[in-house]
Image (cartoon, helix red, strand yellow):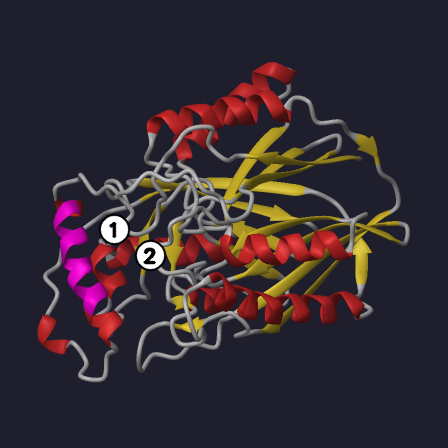
Amino acid sequence: MEYSFLKIDIRSPFETTACGHSCQTVKLSDYHDPLYARVVSFKDEENWILHFSFDLLAFDLAHRNELQEYFRNYYKDERIHVITSTTHTHYANSVRDPEYVSYLCQLLKDETIKMEYRPIDDVSVSYQHIHSTAVGKSRISGYETNNEYLCLIRFFETEKNFFNLIYYNCHPTILEAHTPYFSAEYPGYVLSKLEEKYPDTDFSFVQGAAGDISSRFTRDGQDYEALTKLGDKLFDQIIELMDEEAQRVPFHLSYKEVKITFEHEFTPIDLSKIRSDLSKRELETIRLGQIERAKLEKKNNEIFGKPIDEAIIAALDLNAVKLIFFPNEIFSAYIDHIDVDKEILVSYSNGYGPYVLPIDFEYITYEMFTDTLTKASKQKIIETIKSM
């Protein structure tokens, strides 16, 4: 087996807007902290995995497919499987800016082919997970979930820990929407602290099923100081996990992907069911949700694009744990359909699509207005996730 890791600076050389809030219409040039694509690659006789973790809101399926085709042609190797994930920061360069996306895709191609691989032997992997509301919890008044997870996957060569993958499922929206600079938000902050503490270890991050999880009720502000407070809590929990002796098993790669199709419907939403105990912010987002739904119906939504008709669900089995990759902003309730002792549900991966609420969800929320999937399509998602 061979291994390689690379950090690519993906900050735009020209001004763009940020992407994640509808009010982000002013072009920016200031960066509070770097934005990266973290590329980890493993290859053996059967599989060549290239996983890109972007400090971006999203990365479309068409561009993931473009990268995979490019690398397969460049290396003349059909073993290559490209997996794209985003941290889902709402303060990165806009992925709706065609000039930036064109720049980004070319940059990824040019830099990734420079990756230098080294042989690795006697490789083992461990998996740990804890319930954690260090950064976020349910952002919907009256609706609680117990599916906030911090997960740590550690890779060892003999006794040396050479790579760690962090999983957490919470929207990176601690900062306020009108933030006048770009930022990798809490995932970037935590990763930078880990890299400083463990300079000989590579780190990357995957965002989880965070459709309903944010810092709305855990933060005490929306500036960078508030971000560091919550980020420090998550960092401390990661350090505690790293200090534990975790069971390790031999590492091997197994990759699988399936394509599923979606059906959509624009069922009227009964606004009389809006709860009386909602916060001012929740009421405002419901108003915004109605606007976004109208745009979705016209298929010209600048945040979500048009409703997606198909998705790739991929599974990467590492022996200690299986990562299941799904594109949409799926609610944490879908974690109930996997075994968290053996599996992780990653969102914002291999594409991007609007929210997926649980079947027959009764709370009137912002997220409900952009969820257009039929009950049959949601059942198909559940069945596919279980089958992976």
Residue 324: image x %, image y %? 53, 52
Q: Mark 2 points at which residue?
A: 177
Confirm whether the magenta stretch covers residue 109: no
Taking the spot 56% from the left edge, 22% from the top edge, the residue there is: 109
SS at circle 1: loop
Our reading of the magenta stretch's main secondary structure is helix
Asked whether disc 2 touches disc 1, contact meaning CB atoms under 8 Å apart, the reply is yes
Q: Nearer the viewer, residue 360 or 175?
A: 175
Report the span colored magenta.
284-295
Q: Looking at the image, tell me whether mark 2 or mark 1 is earlier in sequence order.
A: 1
Q: In this view, does 27 lie above or below 179?
A: above
- Residue 66 bears which disc, if any? none
Image-based side of 74 in relation to 292, left or right? right
Q: Assess disc 1: are there few (<14), some (14-19) or many (≥20) residues with their C-alpha within 10 Å of its C-alpha.
A: few
Confirm whether the magenta stretch covers residue 289: yes
Q: Mark 1 points at which residue?
A: 23
